[in-house]
Amino acid sequence: MWVCSGINRAPVSVSTGLCHELAALARLSLTEEEAELFAPQFERILQYLQQLQAIDVDAAAEHVPPASGRALRADEPSATLDRDAWLDGAPASRDGQICVPKFKED
């Protein structure tokens, strides 16, 4: 049983079938050997999450980091890099724009 709600504290059991389902959700494919390798690893992760869920944090004080003492600078317009300077640093450019490899089909 795979639970994350904290209500059901049943032992965590991850089958190779569940590993294949999780892989499919991530658009991955696993061999049977990989699923057998990952199933106990997923079980240990989920068991650890159950241990964390069992901790009562209601009485714990909220942590608020102290102010650093440094004030943020004013948000005011300032000079930026010259267009030619940043285009010179790009691997490729055309018509004043940086060229990147195509990564998505139309």
Image: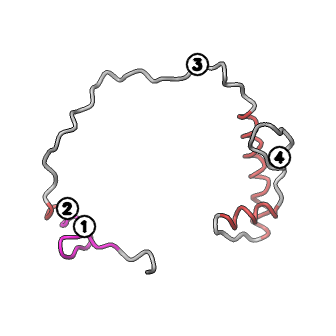
User: What number is the disc on residue 12?
Assistant: 4
Look at the image and say whether residue 31 sits in the magenta stretch.
Answer: no
Q: Residue at x 86, y 43 (%)?
A: 11
Report the amino acid beneath label 4: Val
The C terminus - image quarter: bottom left
* Residue 46 horizontal/vertical position (percent): 75, 45
Camera-nearest residue between 48 and 78? 78
Disc 4 and disc 3: Cα gap in Å? 31 Å
Depth-wise, is mark 1 or mark 4 nearer the camera? 4
Report the amino acid beneath label 1: Ala
First in sequence: mark 4 vs mark 2 = 4
State left or right for residue 22 relative to residue 97.
Answer: right
Disc 2 and disc 1: Cα gap in Å? 7 Å
First in sequence: mark 2 vs mark 3 = 3
* Residue 93 horizontal/vertical position (percent): 23, 73
| Residue wearing tag 1 | 90
From what the image shows, is residue 101 above or below residue 21? below
Camera-nearest residue between 15 and 1? 1
Report the amino acid beneath label 2: Trp
* Residue 52 horizontal/vertical position (percent): 71, 34
| Residue wearing tag 2 | 86
Depth-wise, is mark 1 or mark 3 nearer the camera? 3
| Residue wearing tag 3 | 61
User: What number is the disc on residue 102?
Assistant: none
- Assign a secondary structure to mark 1: loop
Tags 2 and 1 touching, CB below 8 Å = yes
**What residue span does the magenta drawing correspond to?**
86-100
First in sequence: mark 1 vs mark 4 = 4
- Assign a secondary structure to mark 2: helix
Tags 1 and 4 touching, CB below 8 Å = no
